Image (spheres, rainbow, N blue to C red):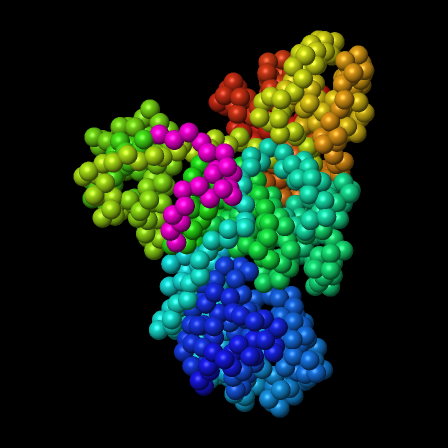
Amino acid sequence: METDSAMLHAKLKEFFGFDSFKADQERIIRHLTSGKNAFVLMPTGGGKSMCYQLPALVMEGTAIVISPLIALMKNQVDAIRGFVSGNDGIAHFLNSSLNKAQITEVRNDLMSGATKLLYVAPESLTKAENVAMLKEIKISFYAVDEAHCISEWGHDFRPEYRRIRSIIEEIGTAPVIALTATATPKVQSDIMKNLGISDATVFKSSFNRPNLYYEIRDKSDPKRDIIKYIRQNPGKSGIIYCLSRKKVEELAELLNINGIKAAPYHAGLDAKTRAENQDRFLMEDVDVIVATIAFGMGIDKPDVRFVIHYDIPKSIEGYYQETGRAGRDGREGQCITFYSYKDIQKLEKFMQGKPVAEQEIGRQLLVETVAYAESNSCRRKLLLNYFGETYEVENCGACDNCLHPKKQFDGREEMSMVIELISSLPERFKMEHIANILAGEVNSIIKSYRHDKLELFGAGKEHSAKFWNAVIHQGLVLKLLYKDIESYGLLSVTEQGQEFYEKPYTLMLTEDREFVEGEDDDDDVAATAAAAKGGGGDAQLLAMLKDLRKDVAKKKGLQPWVIFGDPSLEDMSIMYPMTYDELKNCQGVGEGKARKFGKEFIELIAKYVEENEIERPDDFVMKSIMNKSVNKVFIIQSVDRKLPFEDIADAKGMDMETLMDEIEAIVSSGTKLNLDYYIEQTLDDDVVEEIYDYFHDEAESDSLAAAMEDLSSDYDEMEVRLVRLKFLCEVAN
């Protein structure tokens, strides 16, 4: 059908109350109504929904909208019914949440021609009875929303999306419009190929969201930082993303006991609770939703003022999509992400056991994420470059790197070295490999290719591989280098890069940021940011606490670290804890340790605070919660019942490594366990005695790595870990 501009504007005003279209909306709609396929790449908040809602209302037949989330469908159906009064049948959704009576209602409205928009989950689309029903009606077009789900390179790949093309052919062909807010050229190509719309016109809007502020923070004490941030921004609506369901539940509870109205959202909650929590957020009964990535896809809440990532996302696509939920009304949007390389290591661990190709894709996506997080370049420029868009502005004024620029250096010599090395190799390699060669770092891959014999091996050894990775990454942004995603990130030199090499010019580069290792905070022990960074406390008090620790250790015949570690004392010098509950908020101090050793330390601090008239900072006073992990309770109960560790691990689907990590977290949080039954079954008495004596008399810390180095090579790591746990339970807790 032909549609003129005047008619579309009239319908836009009639149905939606708008006087004009945004960006490419009108072009896309006219293209679709003329019966042609379309691929729409538009950032979150750009108005993608309008591109299929209005055509559906003006075209003959029913538009099938394939959407991944039940919550999104309901929202959109309610919205359409609100726009078109007096006809609830105009929009329906078809998914697993419907009962028989509701399905009959949908069918009747479809057959009568009343329904113009039918939202379908991909799983529902493939059901034989639904295919048969849809064959009986006229389809105006198919809209595939969140189309990045089709691609393995997208951040939310769903295998069932791969079947959409074959189902469309079975139901009956009609124009297809694919829509996504995030797609690299590789993802775009995957989508179009799998949907059979290679002929589709691509409509690409700018990915730049000028109202969003991007910041990466050290993940040294994220809980405290989050609470402090939200308290400084009262009444503002926000989303906090975590990678695990457990962390979602814990953080939501922590926020609530600290006076912040928050609700959890993840796939492990029942559908009713998820819907209720989402509605509470939309209706502003709660200010903050703590969620996994299951939340937010398509959620239209325009006044989300901040998006916080407690954990670094698995991909730049995911990061862009999730941060894009802030400031959809065009006003302020703060995007803060906490980063520690430990999180990357965890994500890499999760990939083990997956097919090789999937692992390769996952690792490549993580490499991109790390490069973004650790870079000192403009974050907006990096993001837009990732999506194939050039950002020419030198300083965006709305990211941490631009507001606090780092020192630059003329990198023409370094970039020339990178280009020379890549060009000289007969085969192509990834970024990390090139960086390792220049830094002179030998590993098995370098040896296998004999690259340690190259003239350029170690040519830049005055710098680390991390430095060279930063140079390479900036070369990609400057289009001097090219990375082939199809080949899992192999590097080559561009024509522009070759020209630079032949005639080098001034090239201002920045070194990447150094991040602290961060604490694994899965036990609910709060560590202060300043302490983790190694400073910021009361130096005089810290010295006094160390003297007291030495005295207590002498009296008890123990190593000082057994009493309290340095991080614990550093926390005390910042927080001035004067009760057992406050002391437990210090890093490495659990209930047991606080009661066993804390009295003298609390008394010293209280006296010091009084004598020096110290005003304790309120922003460090954070109520903590007990770790109520199901695993924790189960493990404690199982150990009390003297079950073999192997049986405990099997019951929870863990390997022994993970179980030991869990037990170590329990013990370090102050819980005392009697592990003798298992140790007696597994280890010889003389082995136990020698390792135990080492920790009691010689060890300068509870470091496992140091113990493995100091002790005889006759002992394996599991033996040392077990006896170390026994020692901590009996002496330190």
Residue 440 vs residue 262, the one in the foreground: 262
Q: Quadrant of residue 558?
A: top right
Task: Look at the picture and state if 435 lies above or below 64.
Answer: above
Residue at left 57%, top 55%? 330
Left or right side of 268 for 599: right
Measured as percent of width and height from the top left, residue 161 is found at 49, 68
Q: Residue at x 47, y 38 (%)?
A: 402
Our reading of the magenta stretch's main secondary structure is loop
Percent of width and height locating residue 410 = 32, 31
Classify residue 113 as left or right of residue 183: right
When the figure is inspected, residue 22 is found, relative to residue 91, above or below; the finding is above
The residue located at (58%, 63%) in the rendering is: 298
Is residue 87 placed above or below 218 in the rendered structure?
Answer: below
Membership of 404 in magenta stretch: yes
Res. 634 image quadrant? top right
Q: Is residue 187 visible?
A: yes
For the question of whether residue 667 can be seen, the reply is no
- Residue 165 position, x and y percent, is 44, 75
Q: Nearer the viewer, residue 223 or 415?
A: 415
Quarter assignment of residue 409: top left
Of residues 625 and 719, which is closer to you in this image? Answer: 625
Q: Quadrant of the N terminus?
A: bottom left
Magenta stretch bounds: 389-409
Q: Nearer the viewer, residue 5 or 139?
A: 5
Residue that sits furthest to the left in the current view: 502
Q: Position of residue 464 (x, y in %)?
A: 37, 29
Q: Is residue 29 magenta?
A: no
Split into 4 quadrants, where in the image is the C terminus? top right
- The correct choice, above or below, for 145 with respect to 510 in the image is below
